[in-house]
Image (tube, grey):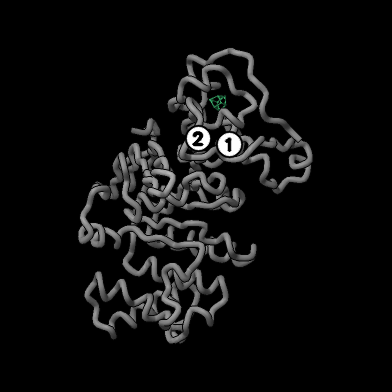
Amino acid sequence: MSIESERREPLLSVDGLSVTFTGRSSLFGRADPLVAVSNVSFEIGRGETLGLVGESGSGKSTTGRGILGLVPASFGSVHLDGVEITGLGRRELRDQRRNMQMVFQDPYSSLDPSSPIGESIAEPLIVHESMSRDDAQRRVAELLERVGLTANHRQRYPYEFSGGQRQRVAIARAIALNPKLVVCDEAVSALDVSTQNQVINLLEELRTDFGIAYLFIAHDLAVVRHISDRVAVMYLGRIVEIGPTTRIFDDPKHPYTEALLSASPIPHPRRQRERSRILLPGDLPDPRRPPSGCTFRTRCAHAMDVCAEVEPGPVQVAGGGEVRCHLHGPGTPTETPVSVGGVA
Ligand code: SF4
């Protein structure tokens, strides 16, 4: 269980979630299993936004999919509003989907390109609420107006919309059943900055109006900083740091968080000039063969002998949240670090 105990009555509890993809057999034998998400724990309160950041391949999207049951969990549990999601059968999972929805980077993931958008938005209302077609179309009109479009858009096809409008349609579909949780997976990444801002403002309005909680997966740290109450940082399938947004951005504890933040521009010219960029050597290791101990050690400028031997556990941080790094905690080792990274 996460030691983030300051949150009361969480809406979502993720406890030790792991997602493993088994290797395919080939002429050369069976590939090693790939642990895409390993022992991930966190909570999200009602109406709260948790940002989830990390490099491409860090396991962010698979975590979102694992929570929604779109990929099976190999270990751990996910509870939404007291109901365990992991292990539900197909039908029960479909019933629970009304409470948890996903908005993807590519709206075509949830919109049928060959159907008018009114039909795509009406589908969950007809399937889950047994609404008549007329009632569903009336509700679709309300939803479209709520996301800044009009009832007249119902008859149009996805290709007739701009990228920002299409994302508004996808959001209308996602909120049709009044979900408690929406997982936004790079939902604004493909949009230009001005459209990004409009869609983010819309997500924030919906949160205020309907109390929706978000797991906001993104690689753009400026966007995450703007929208998130708390931020979790993932590396090679593990959460290495989590905490309140202000603490994470102003006082990051994990060397990986520091490196990620150093690569993101800050809207303050003097602080931007004074800041050094931390360059991480090498690429993300092969998740089929992760390094022993701390999986970040092969790229960490502070790596010590203990880092290769012991996987760091969670340690609470002043200012909120927790970090998994041997540099922190009561038994902080004092070995001389081996330099494998650098600053520029
Ligand atoms: Fe670096 Fe060691 Fe901390 Fe991992 S545990 S981030 S290798 S100092």
- 81 on left or right of 104: left
Name the residue that disc number 2 marks.
241
> The N terminus lies in which quarter of the figure?
top left
Reading the image, the residue beneath label 1 is 257
Q: Is residue 312 left or right of residue 279?
A: left
Indicate the secondary structure of the residue bearing disc 1: helix
Q: Quadrant of residue 140?
A: bottom left
Query: Which of the two labelled residues, at mark 2 and mark 1, occupies the earlier sequence position?
Result: 2
Name the kind of residue labelled 1 in the image. Answer: Thr
Q: Is residue 21 depicted above or below 309 in this figure?
A: below
Q: Residues within 10 Å of mark 1 (few under 14, many from 20)?
A: many
The three-letter amino acid code for the residue at tag 2 is Glu
Residue 45 in sight here: yes
Which residue: 44% across, 45% down?
28
Q: Does 98 sit left or right of 44 as displayed?
A: left
Q: Residue at x 29, y 73 (%)?
A: 125
Q: Position of residue 258 (x, y in %)?
A: 62, 35
